[in-house]
């Protein structure tokens, strides 16, 4: 296994994915998350599709100083997309490993130029470990090890075992020297265990606190759930 210098300095981080289609609901949910101890906010892809740059600007206005991940899933036009989101207040942008290498390089260049970190997403890579290595080699700051929503549901609907990011997480972490987060269908218990696998960036979203079918906040006491997640991730028992 490679030695991960990042593991020595990066404490576990809890990030909430705001996979919502209303900026008002996203801000309300984000406020709850901040009270509960969440560290980073993610403008999820549904929110970006619904609200665009306006949504990211509103999040930045409401939460100055809080890291904001713009889950663009960029496949082309990388420099411009990253520039626009960074100028709107995003501190992190997401590019897909399956984009052309030049697109990934463009996003990395824009990140350098405008002060944003770049997260490379290996979703749908035929070889997930190789996709993670490519992300690192091209200059991304983080790996998002990701099993897609449609992929999970489609495979399960055919009666097969649903893939899980934990299946290859140790292999991905061992292959790279940049921080890794795992997303895509994790249960609450699985999510809080990600740091045990060497993945310090814990993402909370559908289906833990968000209704994965309607992309609305789930019922119940979300703040208490998030508070318990944060406690456990950051060293509680």
Image (tube, grey):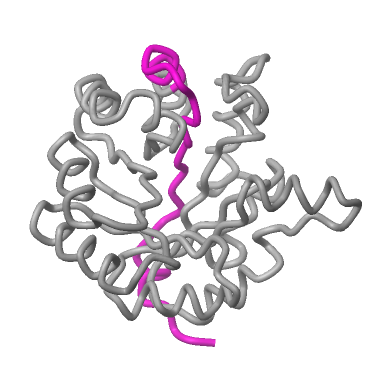
Rendered position, 92 above or below 180: above
Bounds of the magenta segment: 1-29
In front of the other: 206 or 63: 206
- The answer to whether residue 236 is left or right of residue 13 is right
In front of the other: 36 or 31: 31
Residue at position x 55%, y 20% in the image: 223
Residue at position x 67%, y 47% in the image: 186
Q: Residue 141 location, x and y as percent? A: 31, 65
Q: Residue 53 location, x and y as percent? A: 24, 30
Rendered position, 165 above or below 190: below
Residue at position x 47%, y 73% in the image: 132
Q: Residue furthest toward the right?
A: 159
Rendered position, 200 above or below 225: below
Location of the N terminus (image quadrant): bottom right
- The answer to whether residue 132 is left or right of residue 172 is left
Location of the C terminus (image quadrant): top right
Quadrant of residue 43 within the rendered picture: top left
Q: Residue furthest toward the bottom?
A: 1
Q: Residue 34 location, x and y as percent? A: 40, 26
Residue at position x 50%, y 65% in the image: 122
Q: Residue 14 location, x and y as percent? A: 47, 43
In front of the other: 74 or 55: 74
Q: How many marks?
A: 0
Rendered position, 223 above or below 107: above
**Residue 215 lies in the magenta-colored region:** no
């Amino acid at each position: 296994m490679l030695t991960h210098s990042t593991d020595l300095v990066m404490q576990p981080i809890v990030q909430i994915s705001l996979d919502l289609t209303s900026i008002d609901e996203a801000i309300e949910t984000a406020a709850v998350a901040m009270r509960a101890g969440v560290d980073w906010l993610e403008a999820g892809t549904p929110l970006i599709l619904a609200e665009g740059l306006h949504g990211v600007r509103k999040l930045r206005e409401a939460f100055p100083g809080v890291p904001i991940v713009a889950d663009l899933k960029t496949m082309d036009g990388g420099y411009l997309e990253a520039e626009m989101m960074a100028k709107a207040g995003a501190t992190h942008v997401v590019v897909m490993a399956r984009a052309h290498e030049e697109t990934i390089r463009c996003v990395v260049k824009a990140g350098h130029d405008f002060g944003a970190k770049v997260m490379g997403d290996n979703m749908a890579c035929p070889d997930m470990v190789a996709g993670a290595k490519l992300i690192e080699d091209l200059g991304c700051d983080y790996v998002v090890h990701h099993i897609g929503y449609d992929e999970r549901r489609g495979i399960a609907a055919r009666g097969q075992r649903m893939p899980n990011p934990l299946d290859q997480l140790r292999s991905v972490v061992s292959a790279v020297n940049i921080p890794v987060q795992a997303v895509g269908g994790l249960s609450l218990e699985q999510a809080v265990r990600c740091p045990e696998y060497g993945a310090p960036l814990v993402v909370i979203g559908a289906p833990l606190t968000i209704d994965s079918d309607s992309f609305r906040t789930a019922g119940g006491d979300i703040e208490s759930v998030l508070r318990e997640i944060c406690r456990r991730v950051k060293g509680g028992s």
